[in-house]
Amino acid sequence: MVGSTSSTEFHEITGMNTLVWDGHQAKLITLDSGIIRDVLNNKDGAYQKPKTQGFTKKLFGDGLVASDGEKWAKLWEIANQTFHAESLINMVPAIISSAELLEAATWNGKKIFEMLMKLTVIMVRNFHTARFPGISKIFMTGHEIEAEKLEKGIWDLEKLEKGIWDLVMEIVRKREKKVVMGEMENYGSDFLRLLLKANHDADEKKGIAIEDLVDECKTFYIAGQETTTSLLSWTVLLLAIHDHWREKARKEVIELFGQENPNSNGIARLKIVSKSCLHRYISG
């Protein structure tokens, strides 16, 4: 039924609310807008996020995705300051600079992406496996055997996790050093700036630990990689299929930017790449 039945047909058979078991965990599948609204609002904190474990824990840590309560509110406030229109416009020069550094392979962000992708592969292979205490010593699935080989082989999980930590900390130390040397004010103008300010804040209610800073970097690296890769792949596919779109997009970019780097005003005026492709993606 999972492979051939749509979600609408599934709910016609089972009803608006369906309780299923994923190993030892009960899960509610619902189309009831009232229940969905209550869960998403979650004002009283009654609906707790499932605790991340194993590979997922190593991938996302205990950042915004996994946290609850006061910690979630603190991390959300930091992220919310960064990802609104005005802040994103101000970040365009920093984004261009980072892209140029990444293209030259001189920035450790590229290594972080690669390591997080390896962790993602391991996590996906094991995500739907129900684990019961004691049974794993007697019986192992093919995915578990393969994952164990990966962990013991060239993708040693502990080394991978430590490698990501070290790379993030290297970026953090470089940013802190620039501030100390007077080469940069206020830790820059991006998301890392807010994380560093919170990490150095003497007020415990506003401050975050260095572990939280690293976990947030991991969260947004992996989230940014997945969404950006999907969007770029879709855009390239559409431009490859539609020759006239490709010609219009090339002409549009040259008219707006010439040989210069993109800027926020020009990006907002791009019609073919940023609007036509996204419109087709959403409607499809």
Image: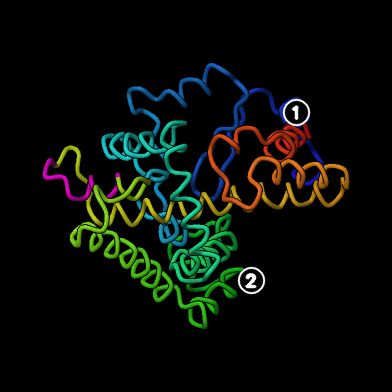
What's the amino acid at mark 2?
Gly
Q: Nearer the viewer, residue 233 or 249?
A: 249
Compare marks 2 and 1 and give the one earlier in the sequence.
1
Name the residue furthest top: 34
Query: Is label 2 in a helix, a strand or a loop?
Result: helix
Q: Position of residue 163 (x, y in %)?
A: 39, 72
Residue at 62% of width from left, 30% of height from top? Answer: 18
The rendered magenta stretch, by its main secondary structure, is classed as helix
At label 1, counting other C-alpha atoms closer than 10 Å, the crowd grade (few under 14, some 14-19, many 20 or more) is few
Nearer the camera: disc 2 or disc 1: 1
Q: Position of residue 38 (x, y in %)?
A: 46, 21
Q: CA distance from mark 2 to mark 1?
A: 32 Å
| Residue 214 in which image quadrant | bottom left
Name the residue furthest bottom: 153
Residue at 43% of width from left, 31% of height from top? Answer: 86
Residue at 20% of width from left, 58% of height from top? Answer: 182
Q: Label 1, on which residue?
A: 8
Residue at 46% of width from left, 78% of height from top? Answer: 156
